Image (cartoon, rainbow, N blue to C red):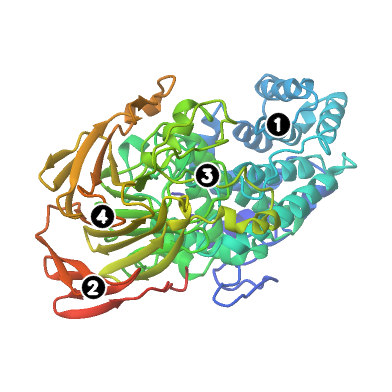
Amino acid sequence: MIRLSWFVAAMAAMAAGLTLASCRAGTAQTSGFAAGDIPAPHPLIANGAWASVLKGGHPRLLGSKAYLVALAQAKPAGYQEVKSINDDVRAAGVVCAVEGLPKEAVQPWIDRAMSDVARGVTNEHQDTWIWLTQVAEAYDFFYDQISPADRGKMVDFLNAHLGEFTIDEGAFHNSTLSKVLCYLKVAYATWGDNPRASEFRDYAIQKLYEGKLVPVLNEFGAGGGYTECGWYTRGSLWNLVEGLEMARRIGGYDGFQKAPRFFYDRLAYEMLQPYPGLFSYMYGAEQYAMEGDGSNIYGGHVEYPRHTRDVLSQYFRGSELSGYLTNKRRSGSNGAARLVDFLYQEQPDPALPLKDFPLAHIATGIGKVYARGDWTDDASWLRFECGDYWNGHQHFEVGNFEIFRYEPLATESGEYIDYGSNHDVNWLTRTIAHNSMLVYMPGEQWKDMRDGGRNKYANDGGQAKKWDWTRDNLAEWEKERATFERGKIVAFQNTPAYMYVAGDCTKAYTPQKLSKWIRQIVFLRPHTFVIFDRVVSTKPEYKKTWLLHSRFEPTITGNSTYVKNGKGELFVQTLLPENPVISKIEGYTYGGMTFDPDRKTALSDKACLWRMEVSPSKARNEDLFMTVLSTDQAPQVKLVRKGTQVGVRVGNAEVMFSGDAGGTLTIGGRTTPLEAKVVTNEWQ
């Protein structure tokens, strides 16, 4: 972690000819919002502080030459590492600005950009904005080393994409956030030379950000959630935040004010999203659940949330959440991440005590909950998912939960290798690959999955696909809201002793087979989880199956199941249904068919290939599932019935459920109602 004194930070900025919003947290006067309990922004670098770069001279995107020189003087150790990075154009751009680089050092980057120019106009998913970005960065970083003729070719190449590069603009998709960053880089890099530079800026800000993304962030962003899957959000959100920060510094445009609730709440979201601890096999970084399409092996993606929370906490300098986020400050786990630290990381606010921060967070807009047992590195951690459908990277996993302690214990299954493959559409994305519920109706069919119909679809007994495809913007989505509705969190409350959440998962399934599934979870801190499921099928013969996935083979003894992964242990006790049928299955298989990936990758080495299944021994319309899980030995448990209520006694606690949602929790003789409503704190 790089710590600058306020004096050094101020001197660095003044040496660069900049205006500081404040040299001390909490004193800035920034025009903007004060919406309810959302604090006003107090960034050190004021809106428009870099505006002079647009009057001429390069570089601009990372700051002016004077700014970068001052930054190198203020962060000498960080700058020396930047000099050692030879595979990142941003590092070369910094060094070129600070002390200059010989032609042979910058020519490869220019050659790469000219190769992109030679491609001509393209309209490719992701690749096009990557190529445009590479050209814009080379244009800005090495402006004086590029011939006027080649600069002209670069500008012509960039401009030709206006009106032709039309994809990657969906309001719910990760690439739109990245395209915003790309177009802002094109605009500011070529400003003054390019008569159409302002069109790129306006396209990014007005059409994509304000026209597409802001309505979604304000509609579904309560609690800091975005409608993409978790893995893709973590990467693309950093691209958006970096782009908005650049527009704020250079153009004086404060895009964070357009969705202030989302951006401030995202800081609380980042407090609970990672697994507890830092991991040596992640080179000292956090580890995250995939939450839809994604990867669980080390890569740059583990650093993007850290960059996001650094920039946002600095923007909201002096706020409570900024102080709590200081506890998560660390240095980057690789050179590229430390390069970003050099460019963006400032001295944080004084740390506020973690013991005062809530141990659970709900993003009500997208239906997602994170919770942990305490703030130690060996805490137990839970994720629960119960929201609607917006994006093709989401899975059929409404009602899914994950449990982590030391290692993933109740986890996801499948390998995100080939989008639209047989493994993808028949395993990875399907309900059977998640800790959810199956209701098997013979003859049920799935149509037009994300492979476009290339594969034959198997009946896993899982959740339905009721839509044809995703929608481009919020207004179009709203017109078909009933089609995309899948799940809703109907109860949430959190105290230091427990967290309670309930989700109505009914709409995720075809009504032809399921009329009700309510999942309720009580997290008895620090290490015990009570999960109660009420499942009602339209016919008793439609078999119901409760799922739990693990990396290694579970051990089943009677109604108890034991899962181990490294140092982590999970003890699972099935109390309902009575006389359950409990089995374990290895592999990506069901219905007599196996859906292995077509090839092996690094994901295969960490694949979770085992699952336990719990089903009733007798056919009924309504079945109850009561399961107690613990990451710290198996507690003494007893099923309890009181009239229409059903519950469980766990040690000195008693949890009783009544009706569709709600009940009571008694700990040490004191009874607390579990209410069927969502109770949030100030950051949710």
**223 on left or right of 600:** right
Disc 4 vs disc 2: which is toward the camera?
A: 2
How far apart, in angstroms, are the residues tagged by discs 2 and 3? 35 Å
Q: Earlier in the sequence, mark 1 or mark 2?
A: 1
Q: Earlier in the sequence, mark 1 or mark 3?
A: 1
Tell me where residue 86 sits by quadrant. top right
Q: Earlier in the sequence, mark 1 or mark 4?
A: 1
How far apart, in angstroms, are the residues tagged by discs 4 and 2? 35 Å
Q: Which residue is mark 1?
A: 128
Position in image of residue 435 (x %, y %): 33, 46
Q: What kind of element bears circle 4?
A: loop
How far apart, in angstroms, are the residues tagged by discs 4 and 3? 36 Å
Residue drawn at point x = 78 percent, y = 20 percent? 118
Q: What kind of element bears circle 2?
A: loop
Mark 2: which amino acid?
Thr
Residue 644 tag number: 2
Residue drawn at point x = 74 percent, y = 35 percent? 136
How far apart, in angstroms, are the residues tagged by discs 1 and 3? 31 Å
Is residue 566 among the parts visible in the rendering?
Answer: no
Position in image of residue 36 (x %, y %): 58, 78
Q: What kind of element bears circle 1?
A: helix
